[in-house]
Amino acid sequence: MHPHILVPLFHRAGISPQSLMLCLADLTALLMPATLVFLLRATFGDVNPALYRWVFPMLLLGPLLGVGFGLYQSVSLPPPRELKSLFLLATLLYGLILTVLFLSQTGRIYSRLIIAGSWLITVFALPGMRACCRRLFAARRWWGRPLLIFDHGEIGRGLWHFLKRHPERGLTPVDIFALPDDVRRTRELLSAAAARYPGAVVLIPHMREKTATVDYIKEAGRWFTDILAAPVFCGSTDVHWITICDLGPTAALWIRQNLCDKRRLLIKRCIDLVLCFASLPVLLPLGLILAAAIRLDSAGPMLYRQKRVGLGGKEMQIYKFRTMVTNADTVLLACLASDQALHVEWERDHKMKRDPRVTRVGAFLRKTSLDELPQVINVLAGTMSLVGPRPIVAEEKSKYNDVYKEYCRVRPGITGLWQISGRNDTTYAERVAFDHYYICNWSVWMDLWILGKTVPVALSGYGAY
């Protein structure tokens, strides 16, 4: 039977094809590391295979735990929350295995290396296998629930374009409508949409009149099972860390601002220091090699220092490997005066795709983002973090407008949401939006997710120049 015929049947049965694929990906990620570690240990050590027969069936409990963590919903969890849930799934599953060993009083005859190694690899394998699954199948027509957007305004169109670019989120926009003003035409529109798109999810926008929003949601509930309502808080939609809190006779939205939590900020700082010190054995030799290449390629210092705006709006010095000629300012003024297109590009982005000031080694450093390596010094000194908003110069304050106050609340980062979301291929307004989103939604898990995404993005060189 053709997949396009099967998909509606899956949805009507309450089964999502993408959930099945993600379940298979999780099973693979759970079984493969344990099998690999076991085989390595059995090959190079003295291990009795019969002892571990019961462990593999226990790993099959993983998807059942995943259901409890919300990992198989038709709409994907936000990436940081999914990363947290996958970590908890792996830890809880191996915790159950250790509990069985403890209660059976047979822990001494089992290899701690096999159990610890399997858990560690599984922690990385679960998000990695899911990323591969989405990369392979997210563009397929059967992936995701069909979404009807009843908002032809700026928010609705923006959401349409975002979800089209990110099918891995699990919602596929199939149509967009403008809601009529009268009840009769609204019912006719919803009835026709329900007949044409069975099993679709409906998005209802926030209306100026609260009663209008409620009325539209109630009316949509007559025709559709799943309805999304887009709330607006204080004129913006930047609050995302929200959970529903049951207060008995009513429900409330629990909004958490992690930047006010000193414990979480301390964890962020500890992660910065641990990762920096752990990477020094690799970064120091690499830094010396790059410094020598810079010196051989062109005259001038190896490091470049520049004043940027840091935490609390205070001025700070950041360090980078020099990627330009020593008379870069003179070359820039001459180029901007002679080329109007370059002048416009510079005023718009503070960047140029074909920058005449960049050296040969500098072009390589920028393409691979290795020019940012010396900023580890800033992280150790406490003026920057591994993850955070892009450090800006004083002249860019005006372009941040109201977001600048939020920017001053956090340390700038070596990498961030902007760097993994297109980098220099984005507009300046999009850069500001990425920084604002990060600040409003920051969590330790978001930092870990961004760090994990940074490595493949840096290796690909996408958006870097």
Image (cartoon, rainbow, N blue to C red):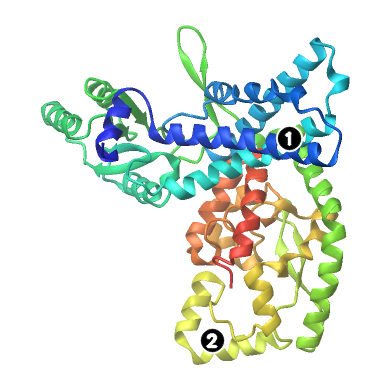
- To which residue does mark 2 refer? 336
**Residue at x-position 74% and y-position 25%:** 52
SS class of the residue under badge 2?
Answer: helix
In this image, 228 relative to 175: left or right?
right
SS class of the residue under badge 1?
Answer: helix
Residue nearer the viewer, 316 or 36: 36
Residue 391 x/y as whole percent: 67, 60
Rendered image: mark on residue 118: 1
Q: Is residue 13 above or below residue 363?
A: above
Separation of residues labelled 1 and 2 (CA atoms) = 57 Å
Quadrant occupied by the C terminus? bottom right
Quadrant occupied by the N terminus? top left
In this image, 114 relative to 171: left or right?
right
Residue 442 x/y as whole percent: 62, 41
Question: Quick check: marks 1 and 2 in contact, CB under 8 Å?
Answer: no
Residue nearer the viewer, 401 or 17: 17
In this image, 280 relative to 132: left or right?
right
Residue 377, quarter of picture: bottom right
Note whether residue 358 is visible. yes
Note whether residue 257 is visible. no
